[in-house]
Image: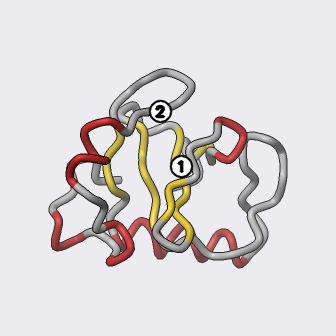
Amino acid sequence: MNHETRHDQVAPSMNLDPDLWKILCCPETKQTLTALDTKTLATLNQKIAAGEVRNKGGTPVQHPLDGGLLRSDGKVLYPIRDTIPLMLVEEGIAVEGLL
């Protein structure tokens, strides 16, 4: 999994305001976040379609993601839907061992 993503590898929905990037952090640990690259997003969406993904709240993730914000330790991803990052701890997806 690529933790340092170039902007040309980022999903189109990830074109967030630069000022927003400065303040976004993991709500649980306050670690920095990076945009999920398109290849990894496609892999995750395949696993979602196969019913293999649950969020930290225990709810199955049923719809493909538009993008994601990956915590700097690579363990948790915060989904993006309709260009809005879902920054609630229970919405996070534990991706360690999944990707």
Q: Residue at x 42, y 38 (%)?
A: 71
- Residue 46 placement (x, y as % from top left): 60, 76
- In the displayed structure, 43 sits above or below 86; it is below
Which of these two is toward me, 93 or 17? 17
- Residue 11 placement (x, y as % from top left): 34, 73
Q: Which residue in the structure is indicated by mark 1?
A: 78
Residue 50 picture quarter: bottom right
- In the displayed structure, 59 sits above or below 92; it is below
The kind of secondary structure element at disc 2 is: loop
- Residue 78 placement (x, y as % from top left): 53, 49
- In the displayed structure, 20 sits above or below 46; it is above
Q: Residue at x 70, y 78 (%)?
A: 49
- Residue 60 numbered tag: none
Which of these two is toward me, 9 or 80? 80
Q: Residues within 10 Å of mark 2 (few under 14, many from 20)?
A: many
As drawn, is 43 to the left or to the right of 51?
left
The kind of secondary structure element at disc 1 is: strand
- Residue 67 placement (x, y as % from top left): 45, 67
> Marks 1/2: CA distance?
8 Å
As drawn, is 80 to the left or to the right of 12?
right
The amino acid type of the residue labelled 1 equals: Tyr
Q: How is the image coloured?
A: secondary structure
Residue 35 picture quarter: bottom left
Q: How many marks?
A: 2
Pointer 1 and pointer 2: residues touching (CB < 8 Å)?
Answer: yes
The amino acid type of the residue labelled 2 equals: Cys
- Residue 26 numbered tag: 2
